[in-house]
Image (cartoon, helix red, strand yellow):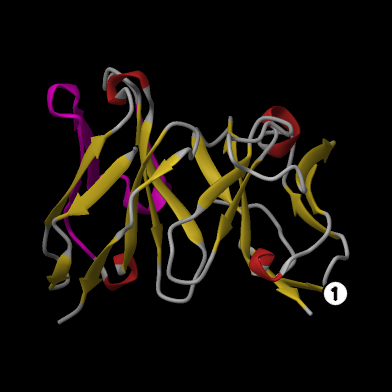
Amino acid sequence: QAGLTQPPSVSKGLRQTATLTCTGNSNNVGNQGAVWLQQHQGHPPKLLSYRNNNRPSGISARFSASRTGDTASLTITGLQPEDEADYYCSAWDNSLSAWVFGGGTELTVL
Amino acid sequence: EVQMVESGGGLVQPGGSLRLSCAASGFAFSNYWMYWVRQAPGKGLEWVANIKQDGSEKHYVDSVKGRFTISRDNAYNSLYLQMNSLRAEDTAIYYCGGGLYEYWGQGILVTVSS
């Protein structure tokens, strides 16, 4: 099953802003948007955002999500050392009747 | 506090079977879609299957269709994954979860190897 496309890695400086992208098609991202997950090494993923920038309780407002057409984006402002992690997007695909994931973006905070 | 605890993983030979279980607590289990997501060593996340609140609807990734079966028992707040005809490429940490990726277990390792 075709997945979503994410850049493998992004590097930004401390306190800078990082924007991670996730590209799909009209059957998935372009239809219902994407969810964003953060995963630190050795830990399960954690939900950051769902359904067009809804954040679960406890998630910092430094994390914001958006979508333009078939591409979803996650913007992280004021980067902190603890933001260094892998970030995944996922979306429900109407044509596949399945959830699809991106390959993940490794964020490095310099 | 939400807790999801997987069990039933381990080492199995190719062609063998395993049944994963997931015990959930701290949230209204019967109100949520539930899912299994896996992660091969050093790789990204892969959605495996999900199941509707009453078990009436199930979906699978193509690579496990016909081999894996997801089920649930709302009376016991439990989720299951029956895995048959296992292959080396099924080797991964398997996470159970609930809702829209809201709740996650710690994961359990399944290794398929001779």
Counting from the top left corner in percent of width and height, residue B104 is at: 39, 46
Counting from the top left corner in percent of width and height, residue A99 is at: 52, 41
Quadrant the C terminus of chain A occupies: bottom right
- The chain letter under disc 1 is A
Counting from the top left corner in percent of width and height, residue B53 is at: 32, 20
Q: Residue at x 66, y 52 (%)?
A: A4
The amino acid at mark 1 is: Gly
Q: Is residue A109 at least partly visible in the picture?
A: yes
Counting from the top left corner in percent of width and height, residue A92 is at: 57, 35
- Left or right, B7 with reference to A17: left
Q: Nearer the viewer, residue A82 or A106?
A: A82
Q: Residue at x 73, y 34 (%)?
A: A53
Q: Quadrant of residue B16?
A: bottom left
Residue at numbered disc 1: A13
Q: Quadrant of residue A103?
A: bottom right
Whether residue B75 appears in magenta in the rendering, the answer is yes
Q: Nearer the viewer, residue B3 or A101?
A: B3
- Left or right, A4 with reference to A109: left
- Left or right, A59 with reference to B25: right
Residue range in magenta is B58-86
Q: Is residue A70 at least partly visible in the picture?
A: no
Local crowd at mark 1 within 10 Å, few (<14), some, or many (≥20)? some
Q: Secondary structure at mark 1?
A: loop
Q: Residue at x 41, y 46 (%)?
A: B61
Whether residue A2 appears in magenta in the rendering, the answer is no
Q: Residue at x 29, y 42 (%)?
A: B3
Question: In the rendered image of this protein, does residue B82 appear above or below residue A43?
Answer: above
